[in-house]
Amino acid sequence: MTSDLARRAREVLDRNRRGTWTCPSGQFYPHQWLWDSCFVAIGLARSDPQRAAGELRALFRGQWGNGMLPHMIFAEGRRDLGTKRIWQSRKRPAAPREVETSCITQPPLAAVAAWYVAEALPSPDRRAFLTELFPKLLDYHHWLYRERDPRQRGLVTLIHPWECGLDTTPPWMRELRRMRAPWWMRVALRLRLVRLVRFFRTDTKFAPAAERASAADGLRMLVLARHVKRHGFDLARMPREGSVLIEDLAFNALLAVANRSLEEIARELDQDIEPELDRRFRSTKVALEELWDEPTGQYYSRNAVTDELLDIPTVATFLPLWAGTASPPRVTRLVRRLQEPSGFWPRFPVPSVPTDARQFDDDRYWKGPTWVNVNWAISEGLRRAGATDLADELRLRTLDLVDRAGTAEYFSALDGRGFGARDFSWTAALTLDLLEAPAR
Ligand code: 2M8
């Protein structure tokens, strides 16, 4: 399987290459996405470190004057009926002039990817690359803490589910359903007119609607995007009532990992992280553990307004393993939970929602299917927690899944069928990393 799988993965990445950057999928996702490009860079780091470095440099074309890295940079000259119109970034003073971007962010993996790539670069290039990226990465982390953790709780608050990467994950969708919808949306939902939204969507032209975000979830996300826009995409201006403000588990766990990468980069460059930022980094490690729920033995996201834990189980519960913040008893419980066949360890683990949960949906986007990027992150976490055998088992099972079903966007956890895009870049890129992992 190995050499053929690697060849197929490389072909996908070559087909999706757009000059210096790589789109997630030629058909479905023609633009540049933040965490997708980070995974592409990680996957390419060892086989093509120069392209991987270019992929990350291209992300900083979109960096805003205030430090934010946007979740999307739009490809030049692509007709885009839907999303570009929502943002209109050029109307924002802090947005870059040369490219159009979205006005929200996505999981902050840029420092993580930069460190993976740097480790693969020959030493003179490595230093130049890190010297160039370090101040930009610092600006981004400063923005995250300044703008998104104004109360200094240690956790960054997200203002839209598109920021969390696990877009339609059940806890977020439950919070969205609680939001008061405008009258026209209530009418549309009642009369089931939301199905009309499908006419304006491109994804359902390429994949069965059952595999994508439901029309109702999609409409609620658009309504929330308009709400966020009315408040300048600015957390400080957003009303506590009527907004959906979440201290997201996956995002903050990945932030803790990224903070550690930034510390590694600083050490490599003989630089210091200034004390104020360093204090914020430490506060995140502590605050992450406040998201643990002892009775159920899981981590959850938290509503930033009510302080309620959003107690629907999802795969995000395993990401703190990579952050390295969990105590040994918590690690033991998580590792045991991960291996339950009727929950997170069916035939093709790890489902985005456990198979025994009411919310589990075999083929729908982030509501059940297995995703390669999450498996990859969990396997990094297991390795860090010392569970190397299980990490390796997950690695092999993930490779087997891609070998059977191809480089799909996501897969059935029950029977391994591929769903969504078939030429998906992070599946291809991380397959390369998983194939090479024993050498690390
Ligand atoms: C999905 O999100 C975009 C919006 O950002 C979409 O639904 O169109 C998510 O899976 C997200 O995590 C991913 O980065 C993006 C591109 O692959 O697609």
Image (cartoon, grey):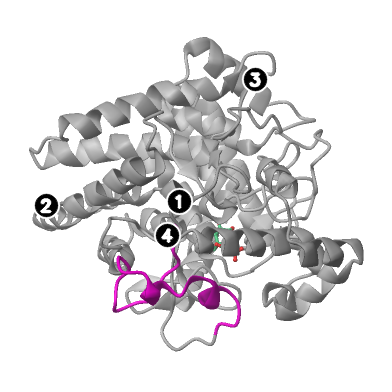
- Using the image, determine if residue 22 lies above or below residue 402: below
- As drawn, the label of residue 336 is 3
State the mark number for residue 34: 4
Work out whether residue 129 or residue 81 is closer to the camera in this orientation and state it. Answer: 81
C-alpha gap between disc 1 and disc 3 = 43 Å
Tag 1: residue type? Answer: Arg
| Pair 1/2: label in front | 1
In contact (CB < 8 Å): disc 2 and disc 4: no
Q: Secondary structure at mark 3?
A: helix
Q: Quadrant of the C terminus?
A: top left
- Outermost residue, right direction? 191
Span colored in magenta: 80-104
Q: Label for residue 127?
A: 2
At mark 2, the secondary structure is: helix
Q: Mark 1 = which residue?
A: 237
Q: Nearer the viewer, mark 1 or mark 3?
A: 1
Question: Mark 4 vs ligand 1: CB under 8 Å?
Answer: yes
The chief SS type of the magenta part is loop
Residue located at (51% from left, 65% from top)? 425
The secondary element bearing badge 1 is classed as: helix
Q: Residues within 10 Å of mark 3 (few under 14, many from 20)?
A: few
| Of the two numbered discs 2 and 4 in the rendering, the one whose residue sits closer to the viewer | 4
Give the amino acid at mark 2.
Arg
Instruction: Say whether disc 1 or disc 3 marks the residue closer to the N-terminus.
Output: 1
- The image quadrant in which ligand 1 is located: bottom right
- The quarter holding residue 129 reads bottom left
Count every numbered label the image shows and give the total. 4
**Separation (CA) of disc 2 from disc 4:** 23 Å
